[in-house]
Image: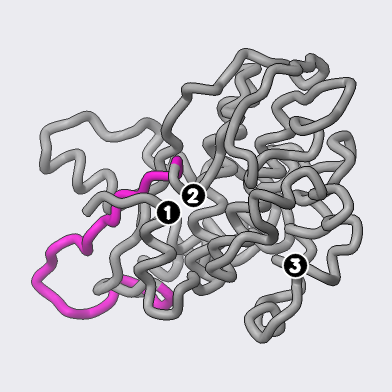
Amino acid sequence: METDLCNYITSSKDGYLHEDICRMLTYQVIVALRYLHANNCGHLDVKCDNILLSLLQPIPTNSDKSSNKGENSNQDFPLVKLADFGYSRMIGEHSFRKTHVGTRVYNAPEIHHSKEGYNRLADMWSVGIVLYAALSGTLPFEEKDCLRAEEIFRDKGTIFTGQRWGKVSKDVLDLISNHLLVVQPTSRARANEALFHNWFTDFLLYQNLREIEKRTRHLMTTKQLDPPSPLTWLTSEREDLVWTEYQTLYAKSKKKN
C-alpha cells in the first residue's frame, strides 16, 4: 500500500501517530536528508505531503510466531521515500540562497526574512515541523502566522500545550525544541548530528528498522529486483558503541528464534 505522511496521520485512529511510529519515520527522513546534504543538495520542501510511505506487509511464513519481541509480525511497517525535488538546489553548508522556496508553514524563519539567506539547514527546521505534526496531528501555527515563526518559537511553551504533549517523552521534546526548531540556523542540528540524538538511541527502533530492511529485501526479491546493497542500509547509518551493542543483541535474539 502506498500513501503519504499527511494521509497516514489524518487516517490514523487517534488523529496523530504514536511516538514509536514517529521515531521510525523521522529517522528515515533524516537518513535521506543526510545523504542529500552530504552531496551538497538541499531538498527545501520537506513536508508531510512530500514524505511518501510504502506500508510493507509481513513476510508470509508457516508460523504465526512473531520473529522477535518488539517486532509485530502483523503490523505494516512504513518505508519512507522523500519526494518532489522541484525546489531542491545544490547548496553547501556555507553557501546561501535568497530565492523563495518551499511551503510557507514548513519553512525555516531565515527563508522568510533573513538578509543573509538560507542554506540546507532549512531542511532540518522542516523536519521539526513534520515531527510536531506527526506527534500531535496539528501544525504549531497557521500559515498566516508564518512571518511570526521566530517570535512563536522563542517562547516554545506556547506551542507545547495540551494533553497530547504531556504524554510524549522528554527526549522527543528536546529534539524538537533544542535541535530542530531552533531559530538560529547555526545552532540547529545537522542531519548527521540529529541521527545520534538520545531519542533515536532505542533498541526497538533498531529492531523496527531491521524489519523494514528485511521486508524491503523480500519485496524486491519477489519482484525480481536487485535489493539495496548493503542490505542494512538503514541500520548502518550509525556507527557508535550503542548501535554496535544493538547489533549484537539483535543477532543473539534471532539465534534464539
Residue 248 in view, yes or no: no
CB under 8 Å between discs 1 and 2: yes
Badge 2: residue crowd in 10 Å (few <14, some 14–19, many ≥20): many
Residue 216: x and y in percent read 28, 46
The structure residue drawn at horizontal position 38% and vertical position 79%, both measured from the top left corner, is 13
Tell whether position 166 is magenta. no
Give the numbered dot on residue 5: 1
Hey, what amino acid is under mark 1? Answer: Leu
Q: Quadrant of the C terminus?
A: bottom left
SS at badge 1: helix
Cα distance, mark 1 to mark 2? 5 Å
List the single residue furthest toward the front.
144
Viewer-side label of 1, 3: 1
Residue 122 in view, yes or no: yes
The structure residue drawn at horizontal position 70% and vertical position 66%, both measured from the top left corner, is 172
SS at badge 2: helix
The structure residue drawn at horizontal position 75% and vertical position 37%, both measured from the top left corner, is 190
Give the numbered dot on residue 227: none
CB under 8 Å between discs 3 and 2: no
Instruction: Identify the residue position indicated by label 2 in the image.
Output: 48
Q: Quadrant of the N terminus?
A: bottom left
The structure residue drawn at horizontal position 68% and vertical position 16%, both measured from the top left corner, is 91
Q: Main secondary structure of the magenta part?
A: loop
Give the numbered dot on residue 173: 3
Hey, what amino acid is under mark 3? Answer: Leu
- Quarter residue 39 falls in: top right
